[in-house]
């Protein structure tokens, strides 16, 4: 069970919805809606603003080695010199791994985790591009995955817009708990980002452009260990659901 206590609010101008969040440093993040990308700090100041960019989703991430991992129907990896070094597209049987990938992240263990909207699944491959597992939700309900990130313990966190929640999985795809739900004041989540240096989780919502800061305690049901983290939630008003 999780308990969220709001600490403070940050208002982030310049975007109409928090579709994607990408950390640069612990105090600087890129936040985007469908056509704008804003570089902001933890007090909501706009440091840089890019406009006129269409059809943005969570199509890119940068790992610890400075490698760019990018969705272009398939998943491509580039080193920090900009050279293409890997394509992830098929499973061992030669079948397509993805139908409509819209968000991705890389775990500390090298796994690439992709939210696929059409599959209704998280598709996870290892560092060599081999399919490890796909997570489609717990028995009895479907997953509608959006933003995805991982924490310092290699847990996977995903925004599920069917459940209006952020779900916590272990690195092997076992569901542990819902860590943010409507009971914590959450509504429609989309963008998600985590900075394991500060243990801050950034969650984009669909109602206004404020940043809610939460301190949350959750229990890993597999190990019985209690983890304490500080959560930041960004709410924005948007028409994101209309695009899908």
Image (tube, rainbow, N blue to C red):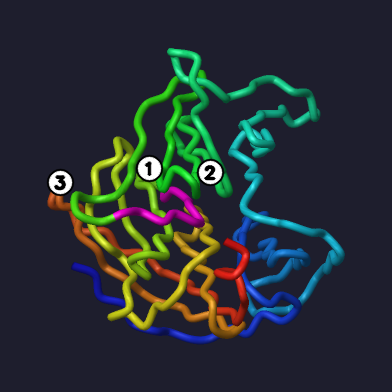
Q: Which part of the image, by quadrant, shows the C terminus?
A: bottom right
Do tag 2 and tag 1 residues touch (Cβ < 8 Å)?
A: no
Q: Decide whether residue 48 is among the magenta residues.
A: no
Q: Where does label 3 land, which residue? A: 223
The foreground one among 110 and 244 is 244
Q: Is residue 117 left or right of residue 139?
A: right
Q: Residue at x 62, y 64 (%)?
A: 243
Q: Residue at x 52, y 39 (%)?
A: 106
Q: Which residue range is magenta in the image?
A: 142-151
Query: CA–CA distance between discs 2 and 1?
Result: 11 Å
Q: Residue at x 46, y 73 (%)?
A: 188
**Residue sitting farthest toward the top:** 93
Q: Decide whether residue 145 is among the magenta residues.
A: yes
Q: Where does label 1 land, which residue? A: 154
Nearer the observer: mark 3 or 2; the answer is 2
Q: Which part of the image, by quadrant, shows the N terminus?
A: bottom left
N-terminal label among 2 and 1: 2
Q: Position of residue 198 (x, y in %)?
A: 49, 60
Q: Position of residue 219 (x, y in %)?
A: 20, 59
Query: CA–CA distance between discs 3 and 2?
Result: 24 Å
Q: Is residue 197 left or right of residue 59?
A: left
Q: Is residue 192 left or right of residue 124?
A: right
Q: Where does label 2 land, which residue? A: 105
Density class for disc 2 (Cα within 10 Å; few <14, some 14-19, many ≥20) is many
N-terminal label among 3 and 2: 2
Q: Secondary structure at mark 1?
A: loop
């Amino acid at each position: 069970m999780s308990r969220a206590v709001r600490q403070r609010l940050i208002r982030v101008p310049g975007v109409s919805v928090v579709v994607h969040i990408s950390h640069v440093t612990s105090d600087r993040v890129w936040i985007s809606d469908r056509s704008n990308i804003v570089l902001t700090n933890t007090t909501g100041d706009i440091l840089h603003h890019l406009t006129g960019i269409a059809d943005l989703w969570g199509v890119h991430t940068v790992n610890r080695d400075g490698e760019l991992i990018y969705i272009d129907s398939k998943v491509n990896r580039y080193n920090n010199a900009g050279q293409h070094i890997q394509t992830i597209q098929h499973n061992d049987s030669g079948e397509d791994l993805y139908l409509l990938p819209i968000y991705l992240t890389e775990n500390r263990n090298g796994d690439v985790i992709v939210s696929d909207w059409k599959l209704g699944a998280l598709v996870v491959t290892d560092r060599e591009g081999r399919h490890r597992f796909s997570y489609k939700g717990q028995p009895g309900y479907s997953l509608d995955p959006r933003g995805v990130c991982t924490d310092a313990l290699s847990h996977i966190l995903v925004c599920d817009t069917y459940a209006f929640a952020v779900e916590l999985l272990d690195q092997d795809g076992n569901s542990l708990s819902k860590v943010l739900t409507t009971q914590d004041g959450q509504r429609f989540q989309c963008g998600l980002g985590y900075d394991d240096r500060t243990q801050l989780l950034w969650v984009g919502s669909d109602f206004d452009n404020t940043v809610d800061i939460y301190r949350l305690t959750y229990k890993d049901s597999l190990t019985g260990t209690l983890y304490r983290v500080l959560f930041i939630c960004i709410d924005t008003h948007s028409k994101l659901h209309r695009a899908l």
